[in-house]
Amino acid sequence: GLKTLHLGSCVITTNLHGIRSGFSEIRDSVQAKDEIIDIRILRKTQSLQGTKPADRCCLLHHILRLYLDRVFKNYQPPDHHIFRKVSRLANSLLTIKKDLRLCHAHMSCPCGEEAAEKYSQILSHFEELPPQAAVVKALGELDILLQWLEEA
Amino acid sequence: HIAEDTSDLLQHVKFQSSNFENILTWDGRPESAPDAVYSVQYKTYGEGEWLEKEGCQRITRKSCNLTVETGNLTELYYARVTATDGTGRSATKTTDRFNSLQHTIIKPPDVTCIPKVRSIQMIVHPSYTPIRARNGHQLTLENIFQGLLYRLKLRINHTYQMDLEGKQREFEFVGLTPDTEFLGTIMICIPNLFKESAPYVCQVKTLPDRTWT
Amino acid sequence: DGAAVLPAPQNLSVRSVNMKHVLTWSPVIVPEEIIHYSVEYQGEYESLYMSHIWIPSSWCSPTQRPECDITEDITATVSYSLRVRATLGSLTSAWSTLKHRFNQNSTILTPPRMEITMDGFHLLIKLEDLGPHFEFFVSYWRKEPGAKEHVKVVRPGVLPVYLEMVEPGAAYCVKARTFVKAIGRHSAFSQPECVKVQGEALPL
C-alpha cells in the first residue's frame, strides 16, 4: 500500500512506490549524463537516517524545496518522453512537500541546528558544481533521496 | 592527429547481478584483437580514486567478479575496463552507475513440493546471498528485503488457480482431489522495489486415497 | 485583417472512470476539411513553478478525434490544467483551457464486475482486470444467520481464482470492491452474488 514516512512527530503517507516506478524509467539515461562521478550531492553524512528524528521533517522539506525550486525547474529534458516522466516526479514530490507544509503549520516540523547544518552542506555540494551539471547530478541522485525516504 | 577508433576492442561493459553476486562483463571483437588483455578498476560514486581489482589485471577472459568490492548495499559504484591489444592499441569504457539493491535480479526460490492425499505442501528454502552481516553471518534475501514475500499459484487442470501469498516459508494448498496432477509456481516478490523472481515450477500429483479400499 | 480565423474548441470536459481519463470537446466544423487538434497539460508543479511551460499530451498532439485519452499524462495526484487547440493547414485556433482543473482523485470507481462459479466443492471468482492501479478486496460468507464474513485480496488474472472449500447443500455469497492505492480510495461493493452447492447437506 502507501508508504508511511515517520519524520519525528510529522507522519505522512505517500505513494513512494509510484515515485520509484517513475524514476526507474529514466534513471539510467539521466545518470548517464552526469559525468562528474567524483562528487556526490546527497552524501551519507547528510542522510535522513543519520539525522535526529526531530530534525528530519525540516531537512526533507529543505531538500524538496531545492529540487522543486532549482532542479526540476532548470532541467532541460532531451525529449517529451523524459519531460513527462520528470513532470510526474516533480508533481509527486510536490504532494509530499505540501504534506510537510501541513506538518509545519501544526508545529510538527521544527528546524533545529542539525537540519540547518546538513542542508547547508548539501547546498554547498550543489553550488560548487556548474549550474547545469548540478541539476543533472541532483536529478540522477533521486534514487538516493528515495532510498532515504524508504528507510524513513 | 586523428584519434584512432578502438571501439572494436571493447563493448557493453556492464554489471550483471543476481542475488547480489555482482559480475562485471564486457565484449570485445576477438577477430580484430585476438591477443587483447583486459584490466578492471572500480570506484565508489562520489569518491575520486579508481581502485584496481586484484585478479582482474591483464586478463584474457571477459568477466570479473566484483561482488566483494561492490557489496555495500547503500553505496553506488562504477567500474571500468581497459582493453589493450598486441599492437598497443587500447580502449577504456565505464559502466553505468551501479547499486546492487536496485539492480540485482532475484533468482527463483528453492522449493520442496510435498504431495499428500488432499493437499500439497510447499516449503521454501532460504536464499542465501554473498552479503555478510557485521557478525559474519551470511544474509538471506529475507534479511535484506523487509518487504519480501512469496507468491504461490496452483493451477488446476487449466480451468482455475489457487493463490497463496505471505512472508512465511511454509504453505499448503488444501481441499484437493486425490491422485490428480497439479502445476505449482512459486515466486519471490519485493513489491516496493518492483522485483519479482522468475517462478520455481513444480509439477506434482496428489496421492491416491486408499482409506476406503 | 480578414485573415481566416479558426474557432477554438469548446465545451472541454473530462470523463474519468476507474482511473481512465478522457478529455472531450465539441468538434470544430469546417465543411469538407479535416481539423486536427493538439492537447497539452500542466501539472500543479508546472503551473506553480514554470507557468509558461505546457507539456504535449502523449497521444493527442496531434489527433483528429474530438477526444483524448490523457490517462498516461495524469500521473500524480495533483490538479492538472488541460488545453486544446484546432489546426487546419497553417491556420491555428486559440487555446481553449479546461475550466476546472482535473485531479485523478475525483475518478469514478465502479464496483468490479465478477463471475462466481463452482468446480466440485471449490468456490471460484473471476474479476475484470482494471489495470495496475487496482487491488480487489473480495468478501465471501456462507448464507446462514451469524455466518462469518471472510475477506481476501485477489489478484485478477486470466483464470478464475479459488476462494474457499464449500459444503454440499449450503449456499454461499460473494461481493467485491476495488482499492486504488494512488488515490487511497475504494469503490462501492458489487451486489452480492449467491450460489447453491449441489448435493445433500452433511448430517450434523
Image (cartoon, coloured by chain):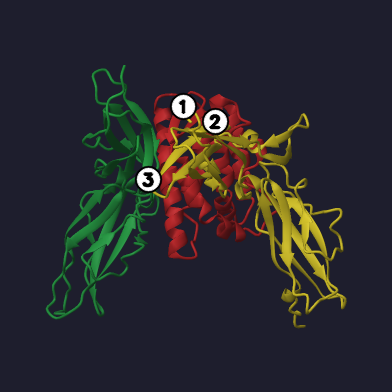
Chain colours: A red, B yellow, C green
Residue for point 66% across, 39% down: B127
Image spot of residue C71 (x, y percent): 33, 54
Residue C180 in view in this figure: no
Give the spatial CA distance, label 1 vs label 3. Answer: 36 Å
Image spot of residue C137 (x, y percent): 34, 35
Q: Which residue is mark 2?
A: A56
Q: Nearer the viewer, residue C129 or C58?
A: C129
Image spot of residue B60 (x, y percent): 84, 66
Query: Badge 2 local density, few (<14 within 10 Å), some, or many (20+)?
Result: many
**Same chain assignment for discs 3 and 2:** no
Query: Badge 3 local density, few (<14 within 10 Å), some, or many (20+)?
Result: some
User: Which mark is on residue C156?
Assistant: 3
> Disc 2 residue type?
Arg
> Disc 3 residue type?
Pro
SS assignment at label 2? helix
**Same chain assignment for discs 1 and 2:** yes
SS assignment at label 3? loop
Query: Badge 1 local density, few (<14 within 10 Å), some, or many (20+)?
Result: many
> Disc 1 residue type?
Cys
